[in-house]
Amino acid sequence: MENQCKAFLEYLQIEKNASAYTVEFYQHDIEAFFQFLHKESIHHLAEVDYSVIRIYLTELFTHQYSRRTVSRKLSSLRSFYRFLEREEMLETNPFMSISLPKMDKPIPEFLYEEELEKLFHVSDLQTPLGKRNQALLELLYATGIRVSECVNLSMGDIDFSLGTLLVHGKGRKERYVPFGRFAAEALEDYIYNGRNLLLEKSNQTTNRIFLNAKGTNLTERGVRMVLDQLVKKASLTIDIHPHKLRHSFATHMLNAGADLRSVQELLGHEHLSSTQIYTHVTKDHLKRIYNNSHPRA
């Protein structure tokens, strides 16, 4: 079973180009299932059937795992067995007959425009790091790109003449995303008046757009630290993370009248259902619609 797991993980890394984070989750879920099988005295994956899976599910819920976690574990094992079936290591996939637990989709947290406006005015634009922070904030909000996509942006991915970014998304998928005037001005100021000064602090050469204080590539963790610092400077009592800016981008676009398909393309979502979670509207937006539309508002 260990060799089968190893073959699957190599498939994820090489053929599916999965991130190290994703591979780690798959490995953890599969190894946990192996431990369950060992406890049940099951030594071959072909012995797993519907009844074994039901016992496994009972154990998961006994340990009070959330529906989301149980669903992820089942999805991991379903993909694992699908791979084994495709490679003719097994004849059937017993997980295909198991339905994933239904989950309530939480409404994504987002920032109001007033909160964002405060963040846009706290960076010290006289320093290289202040210029970088402003460019980072403007770009994340202007494009809705993922933090992993942001830190991997290279100088050749940006086209100021067209106002577009070439974004390298999940699974080697690429997409072009436009950005507006505010992001363009912040990026140009940082690239031409700040990035070179940061790069001088390092003996390395890099094409990455965003650098840290040492002149090396900014990491995802570094982006989170930058956002935390901006919140403190703005004296806001909010919790912020890069994905919250992505949520804010999608929410504000839809509230302003953008169609769902366009937002899906901009976000790089493979399925429209992933974008539909943003179709909620804020109370302010509802009140504005009511005041503008109702004859006796």
Image (cartoon, helix red, strand yellow):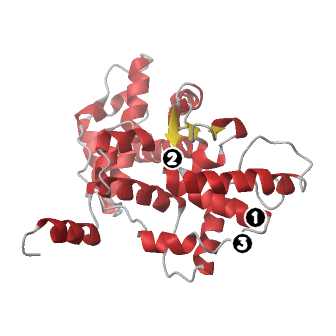
Nearest-to-viewer mark from 2 and 1: 1
Residue 157 in picture, x, y percent from top left: 65, 37
Nearest-to-viewer mark from 3 and 1: 3
Q: Which residue is mark 3?
A: 124
* Residue 69 appears left or right of 129: left
Q: Amino acid at mark 1?
A: Leu
Residue 68 in picture, x, y percent from top left: 34, 55
Q: Residues within 10 Å of mark 2 (few under 14, many from 20)?
A: some
Q: Which residue is mark 2?
A: 25
- N-terminal label among 2 and 1: 2
Q: Is residue 29 visible?
A: yes
At x 88%, y 45%, the residue is 204
Nearest-to-viewer mark from 3 and 2: 3
Residue 13 in picture, x, y percent from top left: 58, 32
Residue 83 in picture, x, y percent from top left: 43, 25
The residues tagged by marks 3 and 2 sit, at their Cα atoms, a distance apart of: 40 Å
- N-terminal label among 3 and 2: 2
